[in-house]
Image: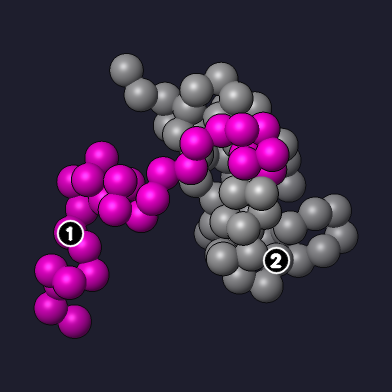
Amino acid sequence: MSIKIAISGRHQLPLVTAGAVMGGNVRVGLEDNLFLEKGRLASSNAELVERIRTILEALSLQIATPDEVREALGLKGPDKVDF
């Protein structure tokens, strides 16, 4: 069974970190949380992703590649959409 963690609000980064340590899959984004840290707004989704990636890598946790995530979720890649 796969555990997926998505937390909204100011505690997003600490709680998704705890979820990842417990073996869950995590996601972050501006749609759930606007802050990178207390009092500092994130400038983009990429900034939030970079922050959680840095935290998880420091804990020696494996980060899935975009292709691995697409496969796990059954999503098309950018080369298979007609935009």
Residue 12 x/y as whole percent: 66, 43
Q: Is residue 11 visible?
A: yes
Start and end of the magenta stretch? Answer: 55-83
Q: Which residue is mark 1?
A: 76
In 3D space, how far apart are the residues under numbered discs 1 and 2 (Cα atoms)? 28 Å
Q: Residue at x 87, y 60 (%)?
A: 39
* Residue 64 horizontal/vertical position (percent): 41, 44
Identify the secondary structure beneath mark 2: loop
Q: Which residue is mark 2?
A: 42
Residue 28 picture location, percent across and down: 55, 50
In the image, residue 83 above or below residue 47? below
User: Does 56 appear in magenta?
Assistant: yes
Q: Nearer the viewer, residue 44 or 60?
A: 60
Q: Are marks 1 and 2 in contact (CB under 8 Å)?
A: no
Q: Residue at x 56, y 65 (%)?
A: 45
Instruction: Name the amino acid, label 1.
Output: Lys
In the structure shown, which secondary structural element does the residue marked by tag 1 occupy?
loop
